[in-house]
Amino acid sequence: MGPLRWIITVSAVTSLVFLGLVILSGWGMAGSYVPSLTDAFPSTLYMEKYSSGGHLLRSIHYYSSSGLVFSGFVFLCCFYISGFAAKYHKSWILGVVLYLLIIGSAFTGYVLPMDQNAYWGTKVRLGIMDTVPLVGTAIADFLRGGATFNSSTLPRFFTLHGSVFATAICLCLFILSQSRKSVFIQYLSDQRFNVTLLVSIILFFVLINSFSARLELPADPADIDYNPRPEWYFLWLFQFGKYVEWAPWIQSGVLPLLGVGFLFAVPWLRNHGQKRRSAIVVSWCLVWLVLTGLAIIDDQDLHQNPNYSEGMAFGAEKNFNRLCIDCHGPGGLGDGPEAQAFDLQTPNFTAREFWNNTDEQQMIIAIKDGKGNDMPDFGESLTYEQILALIYHIEKSFKPNYQE
Amino acid sequence: MIVSFISAPAIYFWRTDRSGVNEIDDRWIDAGRVEDLPIDQWRKEMLLFQRQDRWASFERKELIYINRNDQDITVFSAICPHAACLIRKNDEGFGCPCHKSNFANDGLVLSGPSPRSLDRLDTKVQDGRLYVKYEKFRSGTNAKEVIG
């Protein structure tokens, strides 16, 4: 078996495994995800932070889908270079359709967590879609259920992501597998293959569990400082768009049409020989690398968008300085100007006795409902998550011998 | 063929069930007392209001830029007419961080890809209070089409 055949086999198997993982983990998450403007983020946050298996599910889904986009790309490239595209043109067309469906799922799945990243990224992409000549606005409005983000946007994206595209993908796979039945059976009956696969999946789970799928602060349509950026595999298109700002339809209409047209036409193009085909793939990869690199260089000076815990920690510090500092003091000693002026009973956060006599639950209640005559209640102005972050901030800043 | 017939009712529903078309809400939003606005100085303001979208009612937060001079009050929506990013105030006027459109203080495009000048919002003064008619317009088009 030549190296090309070998890469084709490995990338096909990897893609299938990733696809299986993506679909199954997606079904898992659908068990407690609610696609509505008000509940999408809380249900995602619940999965990530408070449920027992949600974190792993999200990680599997997130990294498998990235892996799928990559391994599918490698597969298509090698399949094309080897000349199989012309030989098995039906499989090639189905493979391309499958890959486009995967990209479509990535696009529709992006918005579902409804954090900053999801909201702004999708908004920008729908904005780009709006610039597609003739049909763009109609398609974007169709997907959104109106011309702006609205109550039925998330249900629609969720349906496309989890039902329409997923069903179409399974259908494509089924048709593909019909012509390759013998190969599938041959692999699945090979004991060594099964064991290798099982071990790699377990290793993948263990590895992935220590990473998290990105989750940022809840979407804030009025956040003026947010810098939306696409997923890594779309950075090149984003960068390309900067060069053709005067004619956005080149980025949104001409380029995708050319690309997809080329992919579908491949089996019927004059067969150039393997060297020529490799040159086409390599030069495309170079263009991709250069544009992606330029996008990263362009963004070097931008501040990184904070993830959820960083954002909450930053918010907690601001909340402490805004709400607590007047009484509790900048050093947490309970010596703020208000406390001194009115002789309030304010605890000393740096004292060991305070922490010996207080648990987290008591602090939550004190912040939420107030305490004694002096401590006001903040249950109206702070959410539960904000209160937890505030307590964490106080512990981290003032508690003696604090350890993470 | 068969599939398109079967899916026709679903597609028809998705086509016609749209938000922001027949909203009956009052769009005039209270933006505070006129005399609190400084003269000849741009202010970034957040409008907080409730809007009904089909079955659900939402708290909306929208940014605007206000300037008052001797004769009148100018209010711009902070949403860039190009790709709906939020514009920021700078020395010459306004700038959009996404695709680098720049606008003068009167809203005209100085440079960049924006197809039209900044979206000016209607205002009225009643009993010494400023009311802004908050509307969203389609981005990326030459014409100012109200979409919500």
Image: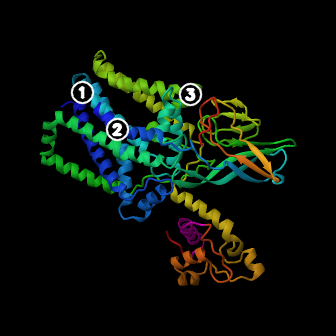
Q: Is residue A149 above or below residue A50?
A: above
Residue at the spot 30% in from the left edge and 39% down from the top edge: A168
Nearest to the observer: residue A40 or residue A185? A40
Residue A42 image position (x, y, % from top left): 48, 59
Asked if A304 appears above or below B80 in the picture, the reply is below
Residue A394 in the magenta stretch? The answer is yes
Quarter of the view holding residue B85:
top right
User: Would residue A46 be found to the left or right of residue A130 on screen?
Assistant: left
Residue B114 lies, with reference to residue B63, above or below; the image says above
In the drawing, what numbered circle is on residue A243? 3
| Eye-nearest disc, 2 or 1 | 2
Subunit that carries the residue with mark 2 = B
Identified by mark 3, the residue type is Tyr
Where disc 2 sits, the SS reads: helix
Q: What span is in magenta?
A: A382-400
Q: Separation of disc 2 and disc 1 at Cα?
A: 26 Å
- Which dot marks residue A90? 1
**Which chain is home to disc 1?**
A
Check if residue B146 falls in the magenta segment.
no
Of badges 3 and 1, nearer the viewer stands 1
Instruction: Indicate the position of residue A203 as horizontal and vertical percent values.
Output: 28, 54
